[in-house]
Each structure stands twice: as C-alpha cells, then as structure tokens.
C-alpha cells in the first residue's frame, strides 16, 4: 500500500528532473497551460450553469415526482423496485442529489435490503450523463443527441440487469 502512495510524488520528482535535464522552464510551461485553461473554463461555464439550474428545476418543479409516479409501474414490470425509480431518474442529472437520495434509501429501508442493493447498483452503474455531456460537448459543434441517448440506454440497461442480479445475491 505504501508503494502506491509514493507513485504520484515520484512522478512529480521525475517530471522535475526531466525538466532540469532538458532545460525546460517548468513554471513558464505551467503558466502557459493555465492561460489556455481560462478560455476553456469561460466556454464551459454557461453549459454547466444551465445543467445545474435544470437539474434543480427538475426537482423543485415537481416534475421528478410526477415522472417517478408515472414510470413506477413500468419499472416494477422490469424488476426495478419503484422505490428507486426517483434515483434512476435523478442520477443522469445530478451526482450530489442522487447521493443524498441514496442515503435516504439506506435510512428508510436499511443498507442490506433488496431495495438498497438495487439502489447501490443504480448509483454505481450509472453516470451523470447530462453533466458529462455538457462538459465534453461544450467546445465542439458535434451532434449530441446520439451519444446522450446511448449513454442513457446503457445506464438503464445496467439498472435492469443489476436489479435482476440483486435478486439472486
């Protein structure tokens, strides 16, 4: 274990030694990189702000609850407990919101229950698709619908398969 904790400092030392040997001005290179990062941050900010506001509006407007109630029978038919349907809908939008929801599920049903195990699978096998898409596609002019749909389908397929496997584990 101590070996792994020494890897990052060793990489930094190796970088400094390499820069000394090659006579590279390391601080100047770092400052140039930071200069290039500022326009990137400025271009990302509107997309990130929009995603954060939309995820909050999704929850505050009651749309999340209405959609959860609407999809609960469909989820039940696929073997997904309706109690985690809100988590399955929130995770693509908000990582911190879904973490809070996962904690509520643990408190309500117990950490060893079938519902909690399915919730763990839903949380662990999915990604905040819209947040990642906002960051990744902010600087590109590519069409974003197809990758987002594929990611959402993959999240859902992992949820269905995970809940199926939780029945046997």
Image (tube, helix red, strand yellow):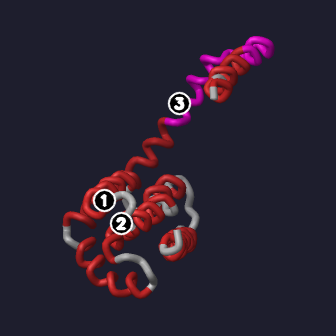
User: Is residue 32 rendered magenta in the image?
Assistant: yes
Q: Secondary structure at mark 3?
A: helix
Q: Residues within 10 Å of mark 1 (few under 14, many from 20)?
A: some
- Label 3, label 2: how far apart the Cα atoms are: 39 Å
- The image's mark for residue 76 is none
Quarter occupied by residue 92: bottom left
Instruction: Identify the residue under disc 2.
Output: 87
Residue range in magenta is 17-37
Residue in the image at 43% along x and 64% along y: 117
Residue in the image at 42% along x and 77% along y: 80
Quarter occupied by residue 95: bottom left
Q: Residues within 10 Å of mark 2 (few under 14, many from 20)?
A: many
Chain-order first, disc 3 or disc 2 = 3
User: Is residue 123 rendered magenta in the image?
Assistant: no
Viewer-side residue, 85 vs 39: 85
Relative vertical location of residue 128 with respect to residue 37 in this rendering, above or below: below
Chain-order first, disc 1 or disc 2 = 2
- Label 1, label 3: how far apart the Cα atoms are: 39 Å
**Count of numbered labels shown in the rendering:** 3
Instruction: Identify the residue under disc 1.
Output: 101
Q: In the orientation shown, which residue stands out farthest toward the left?
A: 61
Instruction: Identify the residue under disc 3.
Output: 35
Confirm whether residue 135 shows in the render: yes
Q: Is residue 128 left or right of residue 23?
A: left
Q: Secondary structure at mark 2?
A: helix
* Picture quarter with the N terminus: top right
Q: Secondary structure at mark 1?
A: helix
Confirm whether residue 145 shows in the render: no
Q: Is residue 139 left or right of residue 114?
A: right
Mark 1 in CB contact with mark 2 (< 8 angstroms): yes
Q: Residues within 10 Å of mark 3 (few under 14, many from 20)?
A: few
């Amino acid at each position: 274990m101590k070996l792994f904790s020494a890897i990052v400092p060793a990489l930094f030392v190796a970088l400094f030694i390499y820069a000394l040997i090659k006579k590279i001005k390391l601080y100047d290179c770092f400052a140039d990189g930071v200069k290039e990062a500022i326009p990137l941050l400025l271009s990302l900010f509107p997309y990130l702000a929009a995603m954060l506001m939309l995820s909050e509006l999704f929850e505050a407007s009651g749309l999340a609850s209405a959609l959860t109630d609407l999809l609960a029978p469909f989820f039940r038919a696929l073997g997904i407990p309706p109690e985690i349907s809100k988590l399955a809908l929130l995770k693509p939008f908000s990582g911190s919101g879904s973490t809070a929801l996962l904690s509520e599920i643990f408190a309500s049903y117990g950490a060893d229950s079938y519902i909690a195990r399915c919730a763990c699978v839903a949380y662990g096998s999915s990604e905040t698709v819209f947040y990642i898409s906002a960051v990744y596609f902010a600087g590109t002019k590519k069409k974003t619908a197809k990758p987002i749909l594929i990611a959402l389908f993959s999240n859902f397929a992992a949820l269905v398969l995970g809940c199926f496997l939780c029945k046997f584990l």
